[in-house]
Image: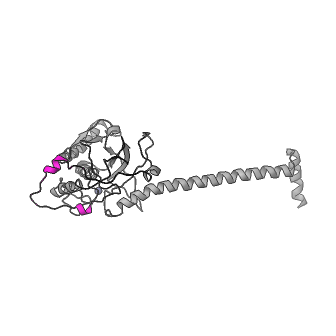
């Protein structure tokens, strides 16, 4: 013991520090360390709580959607985007404090009003999920769509990609008024060539993903969609994925059990065109009440 104490005393002498002073230094360092430790812990808990709140929304609204889906639909309610710093953006903590408007129906868009199915093909409206905002219908027409020109492929390929996606916009335009816009800032629906994040356990790649967020504009509760189409999708598969996801973004927030419908839950070898049942379903959706498009109280 004395052998150990001797070099220690020597060392203290060199440093000109008395054991009491050294002890005080150690105690101070310990408090600083504990302070940092608890603050970091608290930060981790708070961060996780927030991401849990967002995830809960995603889970709630997709829990009844089909587990076999290749194009899983996601809902990211009020997921704050850092690059947009507008005052009217609602963040996750605000979303629960908002006095949402009462859900009411909007006038049926003219084209859907005139739509008649003489073949009595039926619909799959019972598969469409109302969200906590009600049905995801648009009430301000034309719906503005932005197709982002891909920059990580050559110009020719990028043009083909945009044209292919545009084809599906034109198809849906026969049933709801849509309009292309030149900037994402103005868009109600943004379509981007980007791989959706992996999901599930084990993580799986998906061909497409559609998410929406809500915000207020002039006190009106509004929503906007982002569609990600995986770069792995080309030709007929790209058309099918784009057509399907646009169906979700226009209000069909669910899947059809029939492979002959665009909103069928899985990809098929021969992708169908927009079916009578798809339009019948769309029309029914637009007759439903929603909190979207009405003034926040
Ligand atoms: Zn889908």
Residue 27 position, x and y percent, is 77, 53
Q: Residue furthest front?
A: 297
Q: Nearer the viewer, residue 212 or 21?
A: 212
Q: Magenta includes 14? A: no
**In terms of image quadrants, where is residue 147?**
top left
Q: Nearer the viewer, residue 143 or 2?
A: 143
Left or right side of 279 for 63: right
Name the residue rendered at 22%, 46% in the picture: 168
**In terms of image quadrants, where is residue 130?**
bottom left
Name the residue rendered at 47%, 57% in the picture: 52
Q: Magenta includes 115? A: yes
Q: Is residue 140 visible?
A: yes
Name the residue rendered at 29%, 39% in the picture: 158
Left or right side of 92 for 269: left
Magenta-tinted stretch:
103-128
Q: Is residue 163 visible?
A: no
Protein image colouring: one colour
Q: Quadrant of ligand 1?
A: bottom left
Q: Quadrant of the N terminus?
A: bottom right
Q: Main secondary structure of the magenta part?
A: loop
Residue 14 position, x and y percent, is 87, 45
Q: Nearer the viewer, residue 128 or 205?
A: 128
Residue 105 position, x and y percent, is 25, 53
Residue 274 position, x and y percent, is 18, 53
Query: How many circles with numbers are drawn on the protein?
Result: 0
Q: Nearer the viewer, residue 213 or 239?
A: 213
């Amino acid at each position: 013991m004395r052998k150990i104490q001797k070099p220690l005393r020597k060392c203290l002498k060199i440093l000109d520090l008395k054991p009491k002073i050294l002890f005080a230094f150690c105690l101070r360092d310990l408090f600083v360390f504990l302070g940092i430790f608890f603050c970091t812990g608290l930060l981790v808990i708070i961060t996780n709580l927030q991401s849990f709140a967002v995830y809960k929304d995603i889970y709630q609204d997709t829990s009844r959607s089909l587990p076999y889906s290749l194009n899983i639909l996601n809902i990211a309610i009020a997921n704050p985007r850092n690059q947009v710093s507008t005052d009217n953006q609602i963040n996750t903590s605000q979303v629960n404090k908002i006095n949402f408007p009462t859900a009411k129906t909007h006038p049926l868009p003219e084209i859907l009003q005139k739509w008649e199915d003489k073949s009595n093909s039926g619909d799959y409206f019972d598969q469409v999920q109302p969200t906590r905002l009600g049905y995801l219908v648009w009430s301000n027409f034309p719906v503005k769509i932005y197709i982002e020109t891909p920059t990580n492929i050559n110009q020719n390929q990028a043009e083909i990609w945009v044209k292919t996606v545009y084809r599906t916009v034109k198809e849906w335009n026969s049933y709801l008024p849509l309009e292309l816009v030149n900037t994402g800032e103005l868009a109600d629906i943004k379509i981007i060539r980007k791989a959706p994040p992996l999901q599930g356990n084990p993580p799986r790649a998906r061909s497409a993903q559609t998410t929406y967020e809500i915000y207020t504009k002039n006190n009106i509760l509004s929503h906007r969609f982002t569609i990600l189409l995986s770069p792995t999708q080309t030709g007929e598969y790209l058309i099918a994925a784009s057509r399907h996801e646009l169906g979700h973004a226009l209000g069909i927030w669910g899947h059809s059990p029939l492979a002959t419908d665009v909103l069928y839950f899985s990809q098929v070898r021969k992708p169908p065109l927009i079916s009578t049942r798809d339009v019948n379903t769309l029309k029914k959706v637009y007759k439903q009440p929603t909190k979207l498009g009405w003034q926040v109280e």
